[in-house]
């Protein structure tokens, strides 16, 4: 394959059509697979050519992984949340306004309506009151900075934050098995595709297991993602035993020395008994082939559902040992405050967040970046929070 062909292959991953609908029919999926390559390559090559070779392709890829670029994407993705939260808070803190009970009540109302939730909002207000009293604040102008610091304090920084940001794994213990769980429509399939892409970009070999054997569209979507990213996939007929998919995927990963295994699972939360039994079964099968597996269990939640996402997390935490949450579609909602509620109420670290449609818009969660973006900092290169 010549350099130009490799260039075309690489650029298709930066198309504007990265999100694939969770409701895709089999016919639509087939049509998409036939047309996506031609459309995305043509659009992106035109865009690159219009730049007049100002930068090499590899410089542009590097730009998309820089700290400043990621912060801008995060800030842009949180714009709806910021409009319903930070701007509303600032509107209350008029010049010369004094701190009183009425102000604190109004701030609490904004917190609750921003999907931070009653429990977490009450905690923030209590901490705000304590600091106002102990530090002697009188002017409302001081409140904004205190709120920012207290929200940053609540956000859990995952012990694996650096590992997540670099998509690093312990290759001595490979394959690194990640089980993806979550309700249908939360963005599981898209997240698996983006994870596969990013792990591959960081030099790891990846294989996907399509263990949601109850939805034809889910399997077809995963096949499209696997083809686009260029990774292997194990998929059986619709209605097959999900356990057989898990077994075959991990066995193939071991025999071919794959680094990362991504397992899709069914998301039928309405039938909790069957869901529990199935997830327990898949875990047992994983352990038969790898005693420490699964290495990660990621719960995928849709940020647009707000407080319902917390309820989903509670239900799934009863049936699976969740090691982290992936919060999708933050760019499409004003309910991004749910990140704060999740961190406070569930004590489960948010590991990745989706802030856009592009592959690189699945970001490792950074609590400092999130607080800065939510409260309006203009740059991610230097932050006030530590």
Image (tube, helix red, strand yellow):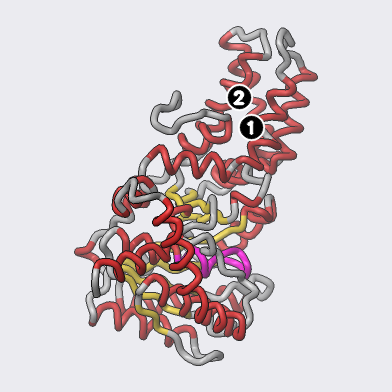
Q: Position of residue 145 (x, y in %)?
A: 57, 21
Element class at badge 2: helix
Q: Is residue 383 left or right of residue 309?
A: left
Element class at badge 1: helix
Rendered position, 338 above or below 167 = above
Q: Position of residue 189 (x, y in %)?
A: 52, 70
The residue at 47%/74% (across/down) is 38
Q: Position of residue 155 (x, y in %)?
A: 51, 38
The reply to whether the magenta stretch includes residue 261 is no
Q: Nearer the viewer, residue 25 or 125?
A: 25
Can you see residue 142?
Answer: yes
What label sits on residue 123 in the rendered view?
Answer: 1
The residue at 42%/49% (across/down) is 364
Can you see residue 278?
Answer: no
Q: Nearer the viewer, residue 171 or 47?
A: 47
Q: Residue furthest left?
A: 172
Q: Residues within 10 Å of mark 2 (few under 14, many from 20)?
A: some
The residue at 63%/42% (across/down) is 337
Q: Nearer the viewer, residue 220 or 162?
A: 220
Q: Position of residue 192 (x, y in %)?
A: 46, 67
What label sits on residue 127 in the rendered view?
Answer: 2
Q: Is residue 171 left or right of residue 195?
A: left
The residue at 22%/63% (across/down) is 171
Q: Nearer the viewer, residue 242 or 316?
A: 242
The quadrant holding residue 110 is top right
Q: Quadrant of the C terminus?
A: top left
Q: Is residue 347 left or right of residue 178?
A: right
Rendered position, 116 above or below 180 = above
What label sits on residue 28 in the rendered view?
Answer: none
| Highlighted range, magenta | 182-193
Answer yes or no: do the residues labelled 1 and 2 have beta carbons within 8 Å?
A: yes
């Amino acid at each position: 394959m010549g350099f130009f062909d490799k260039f075309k292959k690489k650029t298709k991953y930066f198309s504007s059509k990265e999100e694939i609908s969770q409701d895709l029919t089999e016919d639509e999926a087939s049509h998409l697979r036939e047309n996506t390559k031609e459309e995305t390559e043509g659009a992106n090559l035109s865009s690159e050519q219009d730049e007049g070779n100002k930068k090499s392709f590899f410089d542009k890829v590097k730009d998309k992984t820089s700290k400043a670029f990621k912060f801008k994407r995060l800030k842009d993705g949180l714009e709806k949340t910021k409009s319903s939260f930070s701007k509303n808070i600032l509107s209350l803190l008029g010049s010369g306004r004094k701190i009183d009970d009425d102000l604190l009540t109004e701030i609490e109302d904004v917190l609750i309506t921003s999907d931070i939730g009653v429990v977490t909002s009450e905690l923030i207000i209590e901490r705000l009151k304590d600091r106002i009293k102990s530090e002697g604040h009188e002017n409302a102008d001081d409140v904004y900075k205190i709120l920012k610091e207290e929200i940053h304090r609540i956000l859990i920084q995952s012990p694996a934050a650096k590992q997540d940001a670099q998509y690093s794994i312990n290759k001595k213990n490979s394959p690194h098995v990640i089980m993806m769980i979550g309700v249908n429509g939360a963005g599981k399939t898209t997240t698996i595709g983006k994870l596969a892409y990013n792990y591959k970009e960081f030099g790891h070999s990846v294989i996907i297991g399509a263990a949601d054997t109850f939805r034809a569209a889910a399997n077809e979507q995963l096949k499209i993602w696997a083809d686009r990213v260029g990774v292997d996939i194990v998929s059986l007929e619709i209605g097959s035993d999900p356990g057989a998919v898990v077994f075959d995927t991990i066995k193939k990963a071991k025999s071919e020395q794959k680094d990362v295994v991504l397992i899709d699972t069914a998301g039928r939360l309405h039938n909790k008994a069957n869901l529990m039994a199935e997830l327990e079964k898949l875990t047992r099968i994983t352990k038969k082939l790898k005693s420490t597996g699964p290495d990660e269990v990621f719960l995928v939640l849709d940020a647009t559902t707000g407080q319902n996402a917390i309820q989903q997390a509670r239900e799934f935490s009863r049936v699976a040992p969740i090691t982290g949450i992936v919060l999708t579609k933050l760019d499409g909602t004003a309910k991004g405050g749910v990140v704060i509620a999740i961190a406070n109420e569930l004590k489960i670290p948010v590991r990745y967040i989706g802030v856009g449609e592009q592959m690189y818009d699945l970001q490792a969660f950074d609590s400092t970046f999130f607080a800065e973006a939510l409260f309006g900092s203009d740059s991610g290169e230097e932050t006030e929070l530590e």
